[in-house]
């Protein structure tokens, strides 16, 4: 799925965590191993720990006392359902409100009393696949009708459509904004442009709501993102021109990711490390997938693009109830110096889960928070620029950016290419969306056994091979089947992506580095609709480009270090040295 942020490493001390550290679709296991990371700055493990140093009690050490996946966490897991629906509908809805039927022709007002076949025979010149979609004969139709002529003379002059178009609504049984406003022929790129405008809005939304989340808390950002999506989604129905529509979709883009990400962050923060892989993946596999699968049928049975917009936008306003149902982020509260308020929230978990945390445990937690907050003040002097100052870390950062852009482009390209597969778009989209469930389930089982590098490489390359294969097959059913298999494998790659980045980058610049990669992923998503639009040049081009990008992106992951069961880098020097002792053929699943 689309959300592209990453949960902080398990064991990382509460700090000023940016929402760019999390990924609803890409944040899987919150640790480099199933046991969690040990990311406390200055912390040592095992026999190396100084006996004189007080034991750190970080947030993940505290969770087993509260309950790692107790009654309250299960309630929060269920409360993720509406927000997963919201992000799926925000992300995919534009596909179904801008569909254009394959068959369309110039509208001729003088011929409206004739049958469709008679109008086409008299007014529309021959063209590819039978008749022209963008030209009509330039003659006086009133005189022709009076003369009793019912068949066109191919020698008649032609011109472009001057009175709009007629559409065959057999396969797409409703008007869309694209058919109403005539986004075909010379205007056929407008739906593609509007989709890119949506992703530009997502970049601005990520920055704005990320700032709100860091300044005022996760709950205000969660409510703000959903209310923005609600208002802009409803306003879309009033659009009477391309620029009005694009402006509304720009603001709907503000809600993308953020309308779910903040909730995703909160739930994963309160779930114990050993449950995070399950919660992170299965919330997407179950909730997001189901929402995506029913979306085309909402559009199909409502058969009205305006009603579809209203139906999928109005539920977002339910997020205003979040402050009474969802606790604020304890990690964020600690970063703001509100340790006691965070402990009161944990007390609520105790009450509902039926557990009891000893007071000395809370005292250790208070002392650790105070000590680490001082240490993190020093970390604030680092910026994302520091990632590019040393040669090896610079190369790794550039590789992560390129790989994530390739993954984002291939994933979003597959999502939006369903209308080019030559089959029923509603059925094809449903089947393709359903692949998220087996993909996430498979990844939940193997990610902490097989590692990141070879799994990311293999899934991307396999996706690319199936995409290229699909582009070379002329039969629509075979081609669509191969493309959907390619979509299945890139789902897995996408879900590994930003977690990988968050584990490779050093702690002192992790949030900023992941945010940079996150934004570059959106830049690639802006380009994805134009890759799909290459279908007007040649039907094989979209899948061919996606396939080549998948293979190249997959092979590049082999140049990254493996992170499974590794002590992840804390300082910039750690980041520079991380993985130097690894060989390209090292595979965690073979070394166990």
Image (spheres, rainbow, N blue to C red):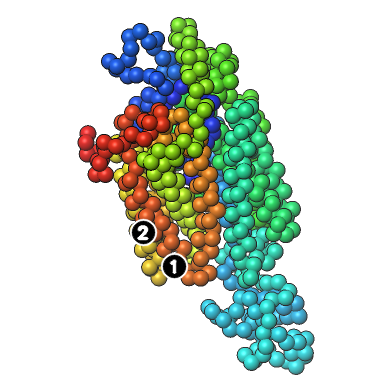
Residue depicted at 21% across the width and 36% down the height: 591
For label 2, the crowd category at 10 Å Cα-Cα, with few meaning under 14, some 14 to 19 and many 20 or more, is many
Residue depicted at 62% across the width and 56% down the height: 194
- Residue 447 falls left or right of residue 209: left
Report if residue 60 is visible in the image.
yes
Q: Quadrant of residue 476?
A: bottom left
21 or 230, which is in the foreground? 21
Q: Quadrant of residue 68?
A: top left
Kindly state the secondary structure of the residue where label 1 is placed.
Answer: loop
- Residue 239 falls left or right of residue 418: right
Q: Is residue 119 above or below residue 95?
A: below
- View extreme (left): residue: 591
353 or 338, which is in the foreground? 338
Residue depicted at 68% across the width and 81% down the height: 159
Task: Tell me where residue 577 appears, x and y as whole percent.
Answer: 33, 34
Task: Tell me where residue 42 appears, x and y as whole percent.
Answer: 40, 20
For label 1, the crowd category at 10 Å Cα-Cα, with few meaning under 14, some 14 to 19 and many 20 or more, is some
Which callout, 2 or 1, points at the residue further toward the start of the chain?
A: 2
Residue depicted at 39% across the width and 10% down the height: 54
Q: Is residue 579 above or below residue 461?
A: above
Task: Tell me where residue 362 appears, x and y as whole percent.
Answer: 48, 10
The image quadrant where one finds the C terminus is top left
- Distance, label 2 to label 1, CA atoms, is 13 Å
The residue indicated by pointer 2 is 466
Q: Is residue 149 above or below residue 5?
A: below
The disc at residue 540 is: 1
């Amino acid at each position: 799925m689309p959300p592209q942020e990453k949960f902080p490493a398990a064991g990382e001390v509460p700090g000023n965590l940016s929402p760019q550290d999390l990924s609803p679709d890409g944040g899987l296991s919150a640790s480099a191993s199933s046991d969690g990371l040990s990311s406390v700055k200055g912390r040592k493990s095992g026999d190396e720990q100084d006996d004189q140093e007080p034991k750190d009690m970080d947030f993940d050490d505290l969770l087993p006392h509260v309950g790692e996946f107790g009654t309250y966490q299960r309630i929060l897991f269920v409360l993720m359902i509406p927000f997963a629906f919201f992000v799926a509908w925000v992300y995919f809805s534009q596909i179904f409100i801008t569909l254009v039927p394959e068959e369309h022709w110039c509208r001729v007002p003088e011929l409206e009393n004739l049958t469709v076949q008679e109008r086409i025979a008299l007014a529309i010149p021959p063209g590819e696949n039978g008749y022209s979609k963008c030209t009509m004969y330039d003659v006086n139709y009133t005189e022709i009708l009076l003369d009793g002529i019912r068949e066109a003379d191919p020698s008649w002059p032609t011109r472009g459509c001057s009175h709009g178009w007629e559409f065959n609504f057999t396969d797409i049984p409703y008007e869309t904004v694209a058919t109403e406003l005539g986004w075909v022929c010379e205007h056929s790129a407008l739906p593609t442009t509007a989709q890119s405008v949506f992703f530009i809005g997502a970049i601005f939304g990520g920055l704005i709501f990320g700032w709100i989340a860091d300044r005022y808390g996760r709950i205000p950002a969660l409510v703000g993102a959903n209310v923005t999506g609600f208002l802009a989604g409803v306003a879309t129905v009033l659009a009477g021109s391309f620029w009005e529509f694009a402006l509304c979709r720009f603001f709907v883009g503000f809600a993308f990711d953020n309308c779910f990400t903040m909730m995703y962050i909160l739930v994963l923060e309160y779930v114990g490390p050993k449950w995070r892989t399950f919660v992170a993946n299965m919330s997407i596999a179950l909730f997001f997938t189901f929402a995506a699968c029913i979306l085309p049928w909402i559009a199909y049975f409502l058969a009205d693009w305006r009603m579809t917009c209203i139906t999928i936008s109005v539920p977002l306003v339910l997020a205003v109830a979040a402050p009474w149902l969802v606790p604020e982020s304890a990690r964020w509260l600690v970063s703001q110096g509100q340790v006691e308020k965070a402990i009161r929230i944990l007390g609520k978990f105790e009450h509902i889960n039926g557990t009891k945390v000893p007071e000395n445990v809370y005292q250790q937690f208070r002392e650790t928070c105070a000590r680490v907050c001082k240490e993190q003040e020093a970390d604030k002097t680092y910026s994302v620029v520091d990632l590019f100052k040393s040669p090896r870390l610079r190369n790794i950062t550039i590789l992560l950016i390129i790989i994530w852009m390739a993954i984002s482009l291939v994933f979003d390209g597959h999502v939006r290419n369903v209308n080019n597969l030559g089959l029923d778009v509603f059925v094809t989209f449903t089947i393709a969306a359903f692949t998220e469930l087996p993909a996430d389930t498979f990844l939940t089982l193997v990610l902490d056994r097989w590692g990141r590098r070879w799994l990311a490489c293999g899934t991307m390359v396999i996706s690319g091979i199936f995409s290229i294969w699909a582009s070379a097959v002329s039969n629509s059913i075979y081609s669509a089947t191969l493309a959907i298999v390619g979509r299945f494998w890139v789902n897995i790659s996408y879900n590994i992506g930003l977690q990988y980045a968050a584990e490779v980058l050093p702690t002192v610049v992790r949030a900023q580095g992941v945010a940079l990669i996150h934004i570059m992923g959106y830049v690639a998503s802006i380009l994805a609709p134009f890759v799909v639009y290459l279908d007007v040049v040649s039907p094989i081009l979209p899948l061919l480009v996606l396939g080549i990008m998948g293979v190249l992106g997959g092979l590049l992951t082999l140049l990254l270090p493996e992170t499974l069961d590794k002590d992840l880098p804390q300082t910039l020097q750690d980041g520079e040295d991380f993985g130097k002792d690894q060989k390209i053929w090292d595979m965690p699943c073979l070394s166990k």
